[in-house]
Amino acid sequence: MARTAKAAPTVGIVSLGCPKALVDSERILTRLRAEGYDISPDYQGADAVIVNTCGFLDSARAESLDAIGEALKENGKVIVTGCLGAEENVIRGAHPNVLAVTGPHQYEAVMEAVHSAVPPRHDPFVDLVPEAGVRLTPRHYAYLKISEGCNNSCSFCIIPSMRGKLASRPVHLVLREAEKLAEAGVRELLVISQDTSAYGVDLKYEPHVWGGRERRTRFFDLAEALGELDVWVRLHYVYPYPHVDEVIGLMASGHVLPYLDIPFQHASPDVLRAMRRPAAQEKTLSRIHRWRAECPELAIRSSFIVGFPGETEADFQMLLDWLEEAELDRVGCFKFEPVEGAAANDLPGAVPEEVKQERFERFMEVAEAVSARRLEARVGMETEVLVDAVTEEGAVARSKWDAPEIDGVVHLPGGSDLEPGDLVAVRILATDGHDLIAGPILAGEDAADDDWDL
Ligand code: SF4
């Protein structure tokens, strides 16, 4: 059965107060956009409204309470945050019907209130952030959306018709947002778009000044400038266009993480042609080998579709062989599904469901074996990891080779004194085939097991 794309849930935001409050609003907006929410410029178009309040002066408090009243009258579903939110009794005294009240910088609580008022929609064929990613994003990493829409016309995809042509954000605006996120304590930026390597084509790579230098609105310049911020920079949704080669140097020199998320989707030239994939050239394998020669640490994650209309057993076998040779670190796989409005639905040669399932299982078996081999090769390495969560037994972190939610983790037994957001030097001790286990790098034989080098 064909799937229908539902309209995105929509949230409005009224932002009052000082520049710090504005940063909070921008941060909330970034989260909302990364999770697939649309932003409404008016009350009527919104499913709920967030009012970011100010509590500094009496006049600002009165203005905030008035703004909440107006939002309740015009929309009805109101979530209050910001400085006056620290005084919940004042707000509830004046407006008992607000849905939630949170204080300043409480992004997670705001997102939680939004999720319960207007549940997020997830569509694996359309969304940039994985389903698990709609959970609360910890404060130490953030998605940085650099463009909307897409100029390609992949036959299985309806994003260009839903979200329009590529519309890049000018480079200085993206960099300013990145800077603010870094200043707010974010340690890792995840660059997302529908086609990151095409960034700026629509703006003819227009230059802007940032950090005292001219930067073009272009993939390489953006990656280079982000690499100047003192944070991890991870690149998602990159296509293997020739100019991607330039960015590998930034990875080799440590400016951006040695990680590329490239949705290859298939390896058979016939299937790629039917999919109308961009950069579907046959030399991708030699490109990957060259990238790895230049940056041996490089991890590549990708996603694939099996059972695409017309995919033969020979095409599928070609995909399996390619996967073995490409040695991809992390791989996701979808069985082809017709999305209402997609050109691929009219292609001949529909693959029966049981064949799709069988190919999916064979594909995942190979992908998991390759992934386990790649992890095994990391055992013994010294590296830096970013702590995501801490329990009584230890900490759960991620390496440079793993994006949140979609890849694996690094378990740090005994790391219970660490804190989320810490960057820690570790030695990889073992792997369970999906995740890594690591310990502190010991200064000497007598160093204690919990001697974590922060
Ligand atoms: S590159 Fe293809 S799959 Fe990705 S958004 Fe554009 S049209 Fe869709």
Image: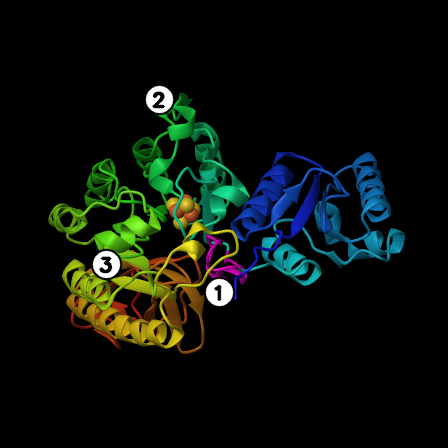
Query: Residue 78, percent across and down?
Result: 77, 52
- The amino acid type, in three-letter code, at marker 2 is Arg
- Residue 19 is left or right of residue 385, and the answer is right
- The amino acid type, in three-letter code, at marker 3 is Thr
Q: Does the magenta stretch include residue 130?
A: yes
Foreground mark, 2 or 1, reads 1
First in sequence, mark 3 or 1: give its number. 1
Magenta residues span 123-138
Residue neighbourhood size for the residue with mark 2, other residues' Cα within 10 Å, grouped as few (<14), some (14–19), many (≥20)? few
First in sequence, mark 2 or 1: give its number. 1
Q: Residue shown at 57%/58% (left/top)?
A: 4
Q: Residue 132 carries which label?
A: 1
* Quarter that holds the C terminus: bottom left
Q: Spatial distance from mark 3 to mark 1, Cα to Cα?
A: 26 Å
Q: Residue 213 carries which label?
A: 2
Element under disc 3: strand
Residue neighbourhood size for the residue with mark 3, other residues' Cα within 10 Å, grouped as few (<14), some (14–19), many (≥20)? some
Closest to the observer: 66 or 134?
134
3 and 2 marks in contact (CB < 8 Å): no
Q: Residue shown at 60%/50% (left/top)?
A: 37
Residue reaching furthest to the front: 348
Residue reaching furthest to the right: 94
Element under disc 1: helix
Main SS class of the magenta portion in the image: loop
Q: Is residue 186 magenta?
A: no
Q: Is residue 363 visible?
A: yes
Number of numbered discs: 3
Q: Residue 204 carries which label?
A: none
Q: Residue shown at 33%/46% (left/top)?
A: 276
Badge 3 is on which residue?
A: 383
- The amino acid type, in three-letter code, at marker 1 is Ala
